[in-house]
Amino acid sequence: MLRGEPFIPETITVHLGAPDSDAADVTVPYIAYLKNSASSEIFPTWPENALRANIYVINTFALNRIYTEWYRSRGYPFDITNDTQFDQAFVYGREIFGNISGLCEELFPRYIRRQGSIEPMFAAFCDGSRVSCDGLSQWGTVGLANQGNTPYEILQQYYGDNIDIARAAEIRAATPSYPGVPQEKGMIGNDVQTIQIQLNRISGNFPAIPKLPDTDGIYDDRTANAVRVFQAVFGLPETGTVNEATWYRLSYIYTSVKRLAELDSEGLSYEEIQRNFPGELRRGDFGVSVRSFQYYLAVVGAYYESVYPIAITGSFDENTERAVRSFQQTFGLPQTGIADRRLWNDLYAAYKGILRDVPPSDCARLYPNEVLREGVTSENVRVIQQYLTYISQFDSNIPPVSDTGYFGPVTRGAVQAFQREYGLTANGVIGPATWDAITGVYSEMKCGAGKRPYQAPGYIIRAT
């Protein structure tokens, strides 16, 4: 869940029966599904404005199922069923009405949403003749159309005045929201931020789950503890790590407490889908996200002979793109030169392997995959405190700190002073970019140039 802007999927998988029935699953082009469902639900002889209103509803209902991963988050291998007790009609292999087909071709990128929300709303409907409901009455739309109402006015009659007809920004393959690798302590990124946002909203209904003070995309001790409590509440192994099972349970519970698959949905605002980190990095990008990415890539490049070595500049330049392509070739990925989610997963796994196998060196210590900030107590904090104190002997702008292993206000002040001195964002938080800068300055001062982890590797891995 929290998949960003809604999109039109290229295909949809339909279960030909009730959710738990032993029925076949069929995957069809999405536009073919919409034409089939509309031809199965409504009559081609109805007034055009009634047909348009109904197609908006049928399309929106299906997009809500996909956007919320309503079935897939509960372990089903399909997006929607054709059982009208749960979803909407679909008759595999049926003929399609010509006028309905044409309207579907025109309207399929558009969906209904509540004003102030971004997700396709749960557009509940029923036939209005045999069955009545709180949503749209299909037969009722005929009378409203005959009275001269527009499709939008018809929809307002059933869903209220606070609705918009939105247009999906793109058509693309529907991919699972799960990032592909377990999210765990030390990881940074939008997937972590998604977990944090979901946990905080769920904690409103389940107060045993501690609310996180920051949803900043940093998987720290507090996030791991909140995950562990969530897992305990919902009967999952209490690992503090978000694997696929925990990810989709989070998604399902989040959708449920926000009622995103209900007519009276709480709604999903733009603020809830905005993320701190770019979804992709590519040539021309710059900033701390690029710098952190380059750090991981540079370290992997030092230990994998087939990965092109780079400098850490904070600018995604030609050399960085070349290194990305060489990494993608080494790990069997499409050679796009773009750092996307799949590349990040493999890069992070490769880095973890190096971190596990390479013994720490006083002159070339790798980033420990632990974000250090105020309130953290660890041996890695002690190391950085010792480094900062050593640097302070040569740079009077950096105050010395005691090596207690506790990251308190004094340590935060010293980190901020270092960050200001060396052109980093002075937030007092030590991620890959700040760790690299501190350990790099320390290494050059104490051991001489060329001693950073990506400059002085202990061994080379030859890709096969």
Image (tube, grey):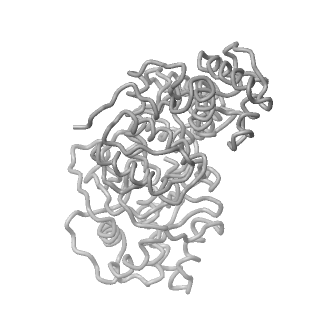
Q: Is residue 388 left or right of residue 138?
A: right
Q: Residue at x 50, y 57 (%)?
A: 122
Q: Nearer the viewer, residue 130 or 272?
A: 272
Q: Residue at x 22, y 63 (%)?
A: 92
Q: Residue furthest top?
A: 404
Q: Is residue 237 left or right of residue 33?
A: right
Q: Nearer the viewer, residue 213 or 135?
A: 213
Q: Nearer the viewer, residue 179 or 231?
A: 179
Q: Is residue 361 above or below residue 243?
A: above
Residue 178 can be seen in this image: no
Q: Position of residue 291 (x, y in %)?
A: 55, 45
Q: Residue furthest front?
A: 448
Q: Is residue 396 above or below residue 191?
A: above
The quarter of the displayed image where residue 383 is located: top right
Q: Residue at x 75, y 30 (%)?
A: 395
Q: Is residue 118 above or below residue 345?
A: below
Residue 292 can be seen in this image: yes
Q: Position of residue 186 (x, y in %)?
A: 53, 29
The quarter of the displayed image where residue 34 is located: bottom left
Q: Position of residue 125 (x, y in %)?
A: 47, 62
Counting the numbered discs, the total is 0
- In the picture, which quadrant includes the C terminus? top left
